[in-house]
Image (spheres, rainbow, N blue to C red):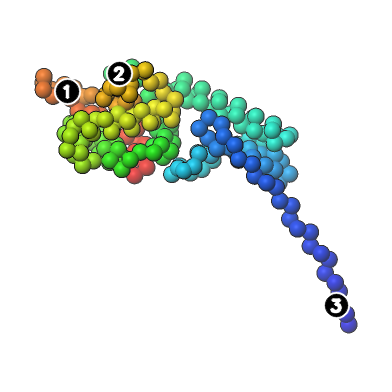
């Protein structure tokens, strides 16, 4: 008895995923289950994971436009929610913002070592000598420059306000990360202390 012929299986419909960028995020858009979807992710290369935001629309362009609006509104809301540090007056990002920034920016191993040491020191902070030692620096000035550079990288990523002469100052960049503790005497300017939000972010990343 001849075998019944199998009906040719229709290949699954596939749709291309399109890549674009908006602000500091990578946008992936396309058609998914009959709907046009756009999703935002951290730009590669990055250690950050997970979707940042998602939007849908009648067309792919509409979904992308809606996602841009979501991202822009999110950035405005985040900026409005930042607290002002009473010591420096700098706007301090939330822990979630710092988590994203620490995972995204290209920090060197010594920079991460200093941030980790300061995070573990909690609100006692560390002297400049101990901060330098944590990253293997023999010079406090070199450690300060590296830490300030880390602060400026994070500030740039989070669109924090940077003064025009920040790059020329050894301390301006550090002020985006934390502040000086109580000055004990004329020769001791006080320990460096990370903002509580950044301490939590660094500890969670470790």
Q: Position of residue 184 (x, y in %)?
A: 13, 22
Nearest to N terminus: mark 2 or mark 3: 3
Q: Which residue is mark 3?
A: 3
Q: Which residue is mark 2?
A: 88
| Quarter occupied by residue 39 | top right
Nearest to N terminus: mark 1 or mark 2: 2
Neighbours of disc 3 within 10 Å: few (<14), some (14-19), many (20+): few
Q: Nearer the viewer, residue 164 or 89?
A: 164
What element does badge 3 sit on? loop
Q: Position of residue 49 (x, y in %)?
A: 48, 44
79 sits to left or right of 139: right
Query: For the view shown, which residue lies furthest in the front direction?
Result: 168
Vertical side of 126 occupied by 113: above or below:
below
Q: CA distance from mark 3 to mark 1?
A: 90 Å
Is any part of residue 53 visible from this angle? no
Q: Which quadrant would the N terminus be assigned to in this image?
A: bottom right
Q: Which residue is mark 1?
A: 189
153 sits to left or right of 38: left
Identify the residue shown where x is 26% and y is 25%. Answer: 170
37 sits to left or right of 177: right
């Amino acid at each position: 008895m001849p075998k019944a012929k199998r009906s040719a299986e229709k290949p699954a419909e596939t749709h291309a995923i399109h890549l674009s960028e908006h602000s500091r995020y990578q946008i992936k858009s396309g058609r998914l289950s009959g709907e046009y979807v756009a999703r935002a992710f951290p730009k590669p290369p990055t250690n950050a994971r997970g979707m940042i935001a998602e939007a849908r629309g009648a067309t792919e362009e509409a979904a992308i436009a809606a996602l841009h609006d979501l991202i822009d509104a999110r950035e405005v809301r985040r900026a409005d929610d930042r607290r002002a540090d009473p010591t420096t007056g700098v706007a301090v990002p939330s822990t979630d913002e710092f988590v994203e920034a620490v995972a995204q920016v290209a920090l060197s191993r010594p920079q991460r070592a200093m941030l980790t040491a300061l995070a573990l020191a909690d609100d006692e902070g560390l002297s400049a000598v101990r901060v330098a030692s944590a990253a293997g620096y023999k010079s406090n000035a070199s450690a300060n420059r590296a830490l300030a550079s880390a602060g400026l990288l994070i500030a740039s990523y989070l669109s924090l306000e940077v003064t025009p002469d920040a790059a020329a100052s050894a301390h301006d960049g550090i002020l985006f990360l934390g502040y000086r503790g109580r000055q004990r005497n004329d020769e001791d300017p006080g320990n460096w202390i990370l903002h509580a939000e950044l301490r939590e972010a660094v500890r969670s990343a470790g």
